[in-house]
Image: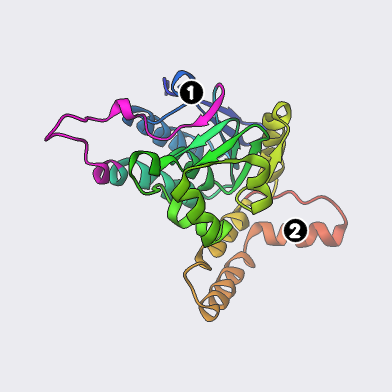
């Protein structure tokens, strides 16, 4: 499939896919067409058998959220933001969280509004040191969406989450790392290489187990300890019958590198 608002690159040998938001003149802000392309791209990535995904942006920004020029502000016919979120943003966030492969956000510049929360919906966030995260919603009289009111308190605590949401202030990459909002701040020149290297490393891991780890960790936010213990038991039972578990044990006994297949 050909794309206009994004780029898709799949390294079949490394089993790594890279999806680049590609509206650099608009800081890669979302239109409905871009949402549709990104949804199709994720289908393509899964169909290609990719075992790791890097999501990044073209130009000087990662993503500035919703492109306001794509909305209708005509009195009496204004775009229903709830419908927009239901149709586009929420399915995207849910899809990223549920993908059965590790997803790395390589935040190359400003990540604002829904763009910030798009990055936080990925499993691991690497950010250029010059990058920043902005919960810009309050600047136009809105509440953080695309999971922002869930991701922020979970990662940085209520005091910092409220501060970021209510002020709409920029949070630099190094402080975001120190607060635990992201995985790592990287020198700008090294960001894409570091993301590619991490993706290649993860693609060689037991990705079936990584998918289960993602599910288990996120379930812990809404479950009791007893429920989580039962989930761990059930997952361990399933994974203990998998190819990758048997291969990992054999490799350990034989003192060699494992050859995982994600099954």
Residue placed under numbered mark 2 in the picture: 248
Q: Quadrant of the C terminus?
A: bottom right
- Residue 109 is situated, as x and y percent measured from the top left of the image, at 58, 30
Q: Residue furthest bottom?
A: 226
- Look at 64% across and 37% down and name the residue there: 127
Vertical placement of residue 250 versus 139, above or below:
below
Q: Quadrant of the N terminus?
A: top left
> Is 30 included in the stretch rendered in magenta?
no
- Look at 60% across and 60% down and name the residue there: 213
Residue placed under numbered mark 1 in the picture: 22
Vertical placement of residue 40 versus 210, above or below:
above
Highlighted range, magenta: 59-84
Q: Which of 110 and 84 is in front in this view?
A: 110
Which of the marked residues, 2 or 1, is nearer the chain's N terminus?
1
- Residue 126 is situated, as x and y percent measured from the top left of the image, at 65, 40
Vertical placement of residue 61 versus 201, above or below:
above
Q: Residue 151: in sight, yes or no?
A: no
Tell me the mark number nearer the camera, choosing from 2 and 1.
1
Instruction: Count neighbours of disc 1 (C-alpha within 10 A) and say few if under 14, some if 14 to 19, many if 20 or more.
Output: many
- Look at 38% across and 29% down and name the residue there: 34
Secondary structure at numbered mark 1: loop
What secondary structure characterizes most of the magenta part?
loop
């Amino acid at each position: 499939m050909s794309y206009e608002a994004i780029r898709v690159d799949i390294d079949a040998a490394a089993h790594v896919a890279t999806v680049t938001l590609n509206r650099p003149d608009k800081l890669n802000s979302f239109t409905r067409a871009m949402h549709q392309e990104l949804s199709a791209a994720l289908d393509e990535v899964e169909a290609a058998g990719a075992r790791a995904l890097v999501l990044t942006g073209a130009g000087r920004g990662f993503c500035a959220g919703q492109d306001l020029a794509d909305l209708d502000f005509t009195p009496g016919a204004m775009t229903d933001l709830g419908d927009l979120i239901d149709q586009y943003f929420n399915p995207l966030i849910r899809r990223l969280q549920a993908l059965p492969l590790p997803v790395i956000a390589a935040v190359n510049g400003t990540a604002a509004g829904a763009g910030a929360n798009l990055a936080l919906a990925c499993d691991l966030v690497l950010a250029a040191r010059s990058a920043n995260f902005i919960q810009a919603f309050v600047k136009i009289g809105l509440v953080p969406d695309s999971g922002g009111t869930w991701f922020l308190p979970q990662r940085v605590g209520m005091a910092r989450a409220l501060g970021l949401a209510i002020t709409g202030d920029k949070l630099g990459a190094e402080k975001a790392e120190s607060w635990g909002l992201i995985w790592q701040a990287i020198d700008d020149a090294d960001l894409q290489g570091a993301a590619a290297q991490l993706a290649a490393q993860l693609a060689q891991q037991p990705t079936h187990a990584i998918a289960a780890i993602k599910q288990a960790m996120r379930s812990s936010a809404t479950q009791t300890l007893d429920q989580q213990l039962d989930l761990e038991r059930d997952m361990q039972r399933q994974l203990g019958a998998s190819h990758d578990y048997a291969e990992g044990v054999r490799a350990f006994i034989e003192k060699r590198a494992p050859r995982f297949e994600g099954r």
